[in-house]
Image (cartoon, rainbow, N blue to C red):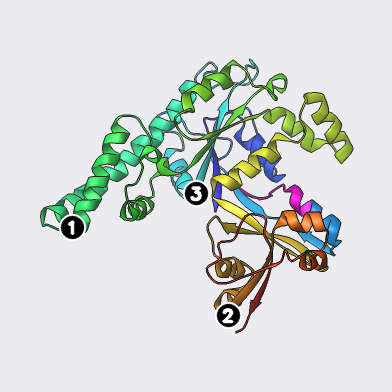
């Protein structure tokens, strides 16, 4: 599961990517600096794993990770191949969610491709290009579906009705994610269409250091614009985040954050938001050898969660021993949790909850 960072050239995408992944993607003050997408495997900050480490004192700790992709900047006409349009759209199609970076700061030394700072116009530029590409996809599919629907094919008729709705939505300059599927068939079809504007989105307002806590007039405009999109808006000073990553010690970083009025780096907030955006959650295994966070999809059953460790665990699943993280944290050890009767035994139908501490019993 990957989240792709998108935006116009020079809005801070590659600098943000470097902050998130500590990879050193090239960062320069001109468009198309990023040509090949850079992929970073990023640790998901989670205070719960720190607490488990404190209690269990394991030999090693393994955090959950999420893949972040830095994609080349998009310009007007990308849907028709302008700039690096076709490549950009291909890269974003391969991602499962979108982190849309908007420039929300003034700085005469950093070029804006359209001459001045206007995050509303910038958002609309990208939205329109993605919508045009999806419209092209939908119209191609409709050509084939219409022929099948005319022959009385019921499945094709269902598909045609949904495609017509999507087409109309895109023509109204709205994204496919605004369409609410009416049933499971439509949910499956939406996944099958692989539309770019159906992907969930998170907006990152890149602000100056002074606006990192409360935002500014540009952030207010963005919030107002996206209020009906059911999308999270995060304020981040990418320049300040880059400065923080350059500091050697934890203490220095904390002093810098306190001076800015922040309790943690904005990048940590963003990584967790991207994790949620991808509909991912975490369960833990906790032993003296290793405390580890495992990544699963929201809604996964216990056998599916076991399969993340090894396919044999899923095939031969017998049961799961489950402790809620809150119970582990408050009682302080597995033994004390058992004494208190708080350890549960769950079967194949159990839906894993975020933060569960688990042991699996299996037989192959």
Residue nearest the viewer, comparing 5 with 353: 353
Residue 235 visible at all? yes
| Other-residue count near label 1 (Cα within 10 Å), few / some / many at <14 / 14–19 / ≥20 | few
Seen in the image, is 150 located left or right of residue 104? Answer: left
The secondary element bearing badge 3 is classed as loop
The structure residue drawn at horizontal position 77% and vertical position 59%, both measured from the top left corner, is 328
User: x%, y% of residue 24?
Assistant: 70, 43
User: x%, y% of residue 137?
Assistant: 31, 45
Residue nearest the viewer, comparing 345 with 167: 345
Residue 316 is marked as: 2
The structure residue drawn at horizontal position 54% and vertical position 71%, both measured from the top left corner, is 348
Q: Residue furthest front?
A: 340
Tell me if residue 96 comes above or below residue 287 in the rendering.
Answer: above
- Numbered marks: total: 3
Which is more N-terminal, label 2 or label 1?
1
Which label lies toward us, 1 or 3? 1
């Amino acid at each position: 599961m990957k989240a792709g960072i998108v935006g116009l050239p020079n809005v801070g995408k590659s600098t943000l990517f470097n902050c998130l992944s500590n990879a050193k993607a090239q960062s320069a003050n001109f468009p198309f600096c990023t040509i090949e997408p850079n992929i970073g495997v990023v640790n998901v900050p989670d205070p719960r794993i720190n607490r488990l480490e404190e209690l269990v004192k394991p030999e090693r700790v393994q955090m959950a990770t999420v893949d972040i992709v830095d994609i080349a900047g998009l310009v007007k006409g990308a849907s028709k191949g302008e700039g690096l349009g076709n490549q950009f759209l291909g890269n974003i199609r391969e991602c499962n969610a979108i982190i849309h970076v908007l420039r929300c700061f003034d700085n005469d030394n950093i070029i804006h491709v359209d001459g001045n700072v206007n995050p509303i116009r910038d958002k609309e530029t990208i939205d329109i290009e993605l919508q045009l590409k999806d419209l092209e996809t939908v119209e191609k599919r409709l050509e084939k579906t219409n022929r099948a629907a005319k022959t009385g094919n019921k499945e094709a008729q269902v598909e045609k009705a949904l495609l017509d709705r999507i087409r109309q939505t895109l023509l109204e300059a709205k994204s496919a994610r605004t369409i609410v599927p009416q049933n499971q068939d439509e949910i499956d079809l939406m996944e099958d269409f692989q539309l770019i504007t159906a992907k969930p989105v998170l907006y990152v307002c890149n602000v100056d250091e002074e606006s990192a806590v409360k935002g500014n007039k540009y952030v207010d405009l963005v919030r107002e614009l996206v209020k009906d999109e059911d999308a999270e808006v995060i304020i981040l000073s990418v320049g300040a985040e880059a400065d923080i990553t350059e500091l050697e010690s934890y203490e220095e970083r904390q002093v810098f954050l306190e001076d800015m009025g922040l309790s943690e780096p904005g990048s940590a907030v963003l990584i967790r938001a991207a994790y949620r955006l991808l509909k991912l959650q975490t369960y833990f295994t906790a032993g003296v050898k290793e405390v580890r966070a495992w990544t699963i999809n929201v809604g996964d059953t216990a056998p599916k969660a076991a399969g993340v460790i090894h396919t044999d665990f899923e095939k031969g699943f017998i049961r799961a021993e489950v402790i809620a993280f809150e119970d582990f944290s408050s009682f302080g050890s597995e033994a004390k949790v058992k004494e208190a009767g708080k350890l549960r035994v769950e079967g194949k139908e159990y839906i894993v909850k975020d933060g569960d501490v688990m042991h699996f019993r299996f037989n192959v």
